[in-house]
Amino acid sequence: MDYESPGCAYCPDTVRACRQGEGELRGPGFCPSKVDPDAIKQAWSAQTDPYTMKVAKVAAIVESEGYCRWSRVEEICQFALKMGFRKLGIATCISFVDLARVFSAVLESHGLEVASVACKNGGIPKEDIGLKDDEKIRPGTYEAICNPISQAELLDRSGCELNVIVGLCVGHDSLFIRHSKALVTTLVTKDRVLAHNPVGALQLADTYYSRVWGPHKPDKLPNKPAEGRKPQG
């Protein structure tokens, strides 16, 4: 069967051929090495950029040195130090300001400078982006928009070389990443229901969180991607 898109999510745990550099030989039909090898070659050509190569190398070293030893906070600190960064930015949800304060102090304890911007900066009312009152979280009250583009601009103007997301909403984080000139990594992924552990919904998808499934839930997890299915609605 010919596939138009890679489907690594369906690769059997007994295969994972890319780990041994054998994707072309043992990879399933939906393996990227078979679906679009030209894309892999084109992406690899970006490694000729010295900065890109440095980021890739330092990230691999941090992965190796901290493997199953360092928390993500420690990994971020070490990555920044090994990259030679001087100043980091924190793009935080306003509900995470207390945690951002601790994180900022941790970074500073390693000799790093820090700038931080909360999502509600500017205090712009949601009506300014076209929201109706009944589309607010609490209708009848003043609600400011999350302002991720401003967060990115403010941190870039502050000279931040690495920006860290702390709990930005889905979509708002996307805009922040899109507009940040500096590298971006994530410390906290917001999930108010699961204590900010979104993977829990996947681990419990067939039990407590079966509501995550849409109308086309399979009887069992398939071993190959469905080709050609279009979103409904």
Image: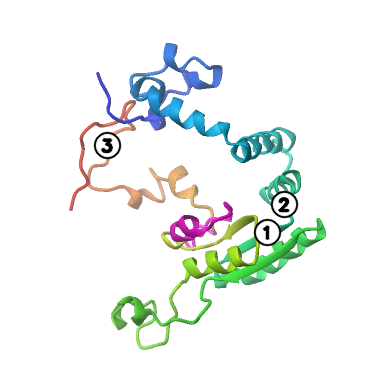
Helix, strand or loop status at disc 2 = loop
* For residue 13, above or below residue 97: above
Task: Give the Cα separation between the discs numbered 1 and 2.
Answer: 8 Å
Residue extending farthest to the front is 49
* For residue 97, above or below residue 85: below
Give coordinates of residue 169: x percent, y percent: 46, 63
Picture residue at 53% right of the left edge, 56% below the top: 189
Give coordinates of residue 192: x percent, y percent: 49, 63
Residue extending farthest to the top is 25
Q: Is residue 185 visible?
A: no
* For residue 68, above or below residue 195: above
Foreground: disc 3 or disc 2:
2
Picture residue at 49% right of the left edge, 60% below the top: 176
Q: Nearer the viewer, residue 223 or 171?
A: 171
Helix, strand or loop status at disc 1 = strand
Image mark for residue 12: none
Q: Which residues are magenta?
A: 173-195
Give coordinates of residue 99: x percent, y percent: 66, 66
Quadrant position of residue 111? bottom right
Quadrant position of residue 140? bottom left
112 vs 2, left or right, is: right
Marks 3/2 in contact by CB < 8 Å: the verdict is: no
- Residues packed near mark 3 inside 10 Å, few (<14), some (14 to 19) or many (20 plus): few
Kind of residue at badge 3? Pro
Picture residue at 44% right of the left edge, 81% below the top: 124
Image mark for residue 218: 3
Marks 1/2 in contact by CB < 8 Å: the verdict is: yes
Kind of residue at badge 1? Leu
The residue beneath circle 2 is 85
The residue beneath circle 1 is 88
Mark 1 or mark 3: whose residue is earlier in sequence: 1
